[in-house]
Every structure is written in C-alpha cells, then in structure tokens.
Amino acid sequence: MNRCTSGDYAACTQCPRRCGTDRSSGKTGFCGETDEIRIALACLHFGEEPLVTVHSGSGTIFFTGCTLRCAFCQNYQISQGGTGRAVSAKEFVEMCLRLQDAGAENINLVTGSHFIPRLAEYISMAQAAGCSVPFCWNSSAYESVESLELLKPLVKIWLPDLKTLSAPLSKKLFAAEDYPFVAEKAVLWMLDNFPMKIVPERAKADYVSADGNAYRAGECKDKMVEGVIIRHLFLPGRFEETAETLAWLKEHADGKAYISLMNQYTPVPFFEKKERLEARQKSLSVIENRLVSREEDVDLRDLIEAYDFDCLFYQELSDDTSWLPDFTRPQPFSNRLAKPVWHWKNGFVPAE
C-alpha cells in the first residue's frame, strides 16, 4: 500500500507548479487546498464517453481544488471556488463501494492531481475493501510523471485532457505557460504504460438508465477496462490550435488511444466578486466566448476526416446548455446526466 506522510505536502512539489507551500500545516497551495482531501460530489454519471459510461454509468467523484486556473471552467465552483468538504479515508472507501453497488462501471476520479499521495493510499484501501471495478483517472494532464507513478498500480483507465499546444494561450487561459510541455509528457507516459483493452459488456437485466436509454438483458456494448482516452475541447475561434493538437495526437496516439474531440464549449454564467470576474473576462478575451458555430462544426468534421483517426469520438453539435452543473445543489446536473450517491452538503443519499 502507498503510505502518505505529512512530508508529501510540506514545501509542496506535488504538481508542476512546485509552489513550495507547507500544505501539511493547514496552508493552501496554488491548488487552493491543504493536505486534506476534499470532495464535492459522487454520482453515477451518464455524460462520459460510451466506453466509460457503458450501461450503468461512470461512478464519478469530483474533487475540490485544481492545479490550473482555466478561465472558462464549467466546474469553477469546485475547482476555483472551494466548494466541497473534507472526507476521511473511511468515507472515501464507502463512496467507492456505494458507487459500485449502484452499478458503476468504474470509479472516475475527476481533478485529483493535487491530492495524489494521499489519494493513492485511499484507492488502495478501497480496493482492499472490495472495490473491484477499474479506477479511472480524469485530469487536465497538468501533473508530473513522478506523481503519476504512484497511481500506476492502482488506476487502469486514463482520461487526460490535451487542451492546447500553444504556450501563449496556456499562459492566458490556464495561468500555466508550461502546460503543453507538461501535458505532452504526462500523456506520453500514459500511452506507454496502458495499452487499450476493450471488452464486450452485456446488460444484466432489462432496465431504463437515468439518461433515458432502454436496455434488454444480454445487450452488448464495448467497455474499456484499461487504456487511455485523450480529450480535446475545441475553443471557439481557435481552429488552428485544434488542428495543431490533432496533428500531435495523430503522430503520437493514433491506434494507441481513443481521441475524444469535444465541441461543447459553453459560456459559463460566473457568480464571483467584481475583481475576480474582471480578471476572468480579461483572460477569456483571447478566445471567442460563445457556443461553437455550425460553420466551425463543419470544419472540425472535415479535419477529422482528413486525419482519419483509428479511434475517435465526436459529439453532435448542440445549443443545449442545461448540462452546466451547479454544485451548490444536491443534484448539480440534470437527472438525465447524473444520479447522486453523495453530496458535500448532505452526505450519502439513501439507497433506493
């Protein structure tokens, strides 16, 4: 079992920022967090890629804090606003087991990079307690390979972002000019260590899932049990950055991982203090803060066709913004997208 000590967070160097804060003393690092693991929500999530959601949904756990400062972050309440509460190892283990009992295809850990040493210990404890579904690491890829090595024996599925290869854009939008270099290195490590393993998964009974899809017993869908899905979000008005990123992925990841090209960029109605909002708007000025246009969607489809990836997901264009979460509510998403199991305000949801 990985053992976490206070020294892992003293003069913290857990993420590439190496901010040097003594998080073990209760001080918060750049990530906004001390050494206590804080969580906002645990739920069955039906909005992830099909290989992860499969029939019963992904058992998704959203962590508080983040190593980046994405100006457009849809989860800003938890990544930058501090929404969530501290959980013990015991409570984390129970979360994982309840998600598994609810039918989760995997345990999907969202934005936990700044907690890796302690989180590695918690995952080990959950697996020892009987959590047998694969753990999935869902991150920005702004994390060091040295930290990721702690997760190597514990995590099977990797969902990193590759947001951009432009250092100037990264500096403006994420407050991390070195993001492209760091993310490339992290993604290559994942590709080298976790080849794809896809298996057929049969529905165990007739049922209708929370997302409204009906299944018959025995119906089969592909399921990822090990491997990498690399996500890239197209930023409106920045077609060249996406073309450059897809070119890199074609060279380094084609045939080794699934590519998930997302066109769901959505302007977020931020509720923040005036000074923070003004700074955010200044950062957002480097992109066109709007929904993706139909013309851009056509161009993206042409780009996909030109690159001809072996394995790629692409969304249908939609102007529906109802999926934006509000983590102050016990149900942050629509009922179609998620089924909460635990919420930071109310704890565990009674089993049905």
Image (spheres, helix red, strand yellow):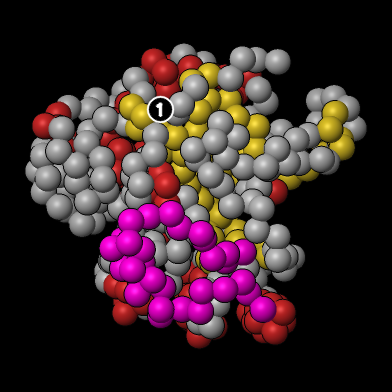
**Which range of residues does the magenta coloring cover?**
264-293
Q: Is residue 16 left or right of residue 63?
A: left
Which residue appears at 22% of the width and 51% of the height?
30
- The residue closer to the viewer here, 227 or 239, is 239
As drawn, the residue found furthest toward the front would be 274
Picture coordinates of residue 53, whole percent (x, y): 67, 42
- The residue closer to the viewer here, 191 or 232, is 232
- The residue closer to the viewer here, 317 or 204, is 317
Disc 1, SS:
helix
**Quadrant in which the C terminus is drawn:** top right
* Quarter of the view holding residue 290: bottom right
Give the answer, above or below, for where 126 lies relative to 275. above
- Total marks in image: 1
Q: Main secondary structure of the magenta part?
A: loop
Which residue appears at 57% of the width and 64% of the height?
266
In this view of the protein, can residue 238 be seen by the observer?
Answer: yes
Which residue appears at 14% of the width and 38% of the height?
27
Picture coordinates of residue 318, whole percent (x, y): 72, 65
- The residue closer to the viewer here, 338 or 334, is 334
Picture coordinates of residue 48, whole percent (x, y): 63, 48
Give the answer, above or below, for where 179 lies relative to 225. below
In this view of the protein, can residue 134 be seen by the observer?
Answer: no
* Quarter of the view holding residue 151: top left
Residue type, mark 1 in image:
Ile
Tell whether position 292 is magenta.
yes
Which residue appears at 65% of the width and 32% of the height?
339
Give the answer, above or below, for where 292 lies relative to 261. below
The residue labelled by disc 1 is 123
Picture coordinates of residue 164, whole percent (x, y): 43, 72
Q: Is residue 139 left or right of residue 181?
A: right
Q: Is residue 106 left or right of residue 55?
A: left
